[in-house]
Amino acid sequence: DMKVTQMPRYLIKRMGENVLLECGQDMSHETMYWYRQDPGLGLQLIYISYDVDSNSEGDIPKGYRVSRKKREHFSLILDSAKTNQTSVYFCASSFSRGRNERLFFGHGTKLSVL
Amino acid sequence: QEKVQQSPESLIVPEGAMVSLNCSFSDSASQSIWWYQQHPGKGPKALISIFSNGNKKEGRLTVYLNRASLHVSLHIKDSQPSDSAVYLCAALYGNEKITFGAGTKLTIKP
């Protein structure tokens, strides 16, 4: 069906709590991404995953970790969330790596850390 | 960190006007350059890409690429209110990092 699904859509957490953002895709894409989007900064790359248990840091990985145990599922974890991690988080997928192929994005998760 | 710069930051045009959006990238960008459209509260959606110097036309969209000047532009003909969105330019750096510009917010006035 060519879909990237993110859960939850909205999340409010207190500083210091753990956060789990989940992403699924139904296209059997090898490569998946986590970005965050802040006003004026555009999309910033947090992590890339090339397949199960094959992950690589993006440009702003500090404070985040990821998990990919199945090809169709990619999680972003914030251990002890900070207020500066308030943002909209987007998951994306593409067929393969190493080429600027079309990315398919989810609808995003709006995270507020109070 | 390699950059992608977009201009203008925002643009308001009347319905039916031609829209021109600009994007510049670093000389280490490889592969295709993509344009994405993002409506409020939604994820970006791929619109059109270009790999070779020159232009590419798809419907009301035309994209121009000049690798020598490190510049790509997107032109929207006969703009519609539904074209109101943020437009993002994306380039690939190294073998894996797809980097986005901050976007141009386009408003089409009916």
Image: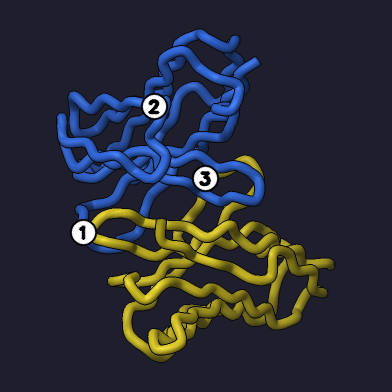
Q: Drawn colour of chain A?
A: blue
Report the front residue among B82 and B71.
B71
**Sooner in the amino-acid sequence: mark 2 or mark 1:** 2
Any part of residue A106 in sight: no
Any part of residue A3 in sight: yes
The image shows residue B47 at horizontal and vertical percentages of 47, 65
For disc 1, the marked residue is A98
Q: Residue at x 38, y 49 (%)?
A: A104
Question: Badges 3 and 2: C-beta atoms under 8 Å apart?
Answer: no
Type of the residue with mark 1: Gly
The image shows residue A95 at horizontal and vertical percentages of 23, 52
Q: In the picture provided, is B92 more to the left or to the right than A105?
A: left
Indicate whether B85 appears above or below A50. Answer: below
Type of the residue with mark 3: Gly
- The mark found on residue A64 in the picture is 2
Colour yellow, chain: B
- The mark found on residue B43 in the picture is 3
Category of crowding for the residue at label 3, using alpha-carbon neighbours closer than 10 angstroms: few (below 14), some (14–19), many (at least 20):
many
- Using the numbered discs, state the Cα–Cα distance from disc 3 to disc 1 in whole angstroms: 22 Å
Category of crowding for the residue at label 1, using alpha-carbon neighbours closer than 10 angstroms: few (below 14), some (14–19), many (at least 20):
some
The answer to which quarter of the image holds residue B61 is bottom right
Label 2: element kind:
loop
Q: In the picture provided, is B95 more to the left or to the right than B98?
A: left
Q: Residue at x 28, y 37 (%)?
A: A26
Marks 2 and 1 belong to one chain: yes
The image shows residue B94 at horizontal and vertical percentages of 26, 61
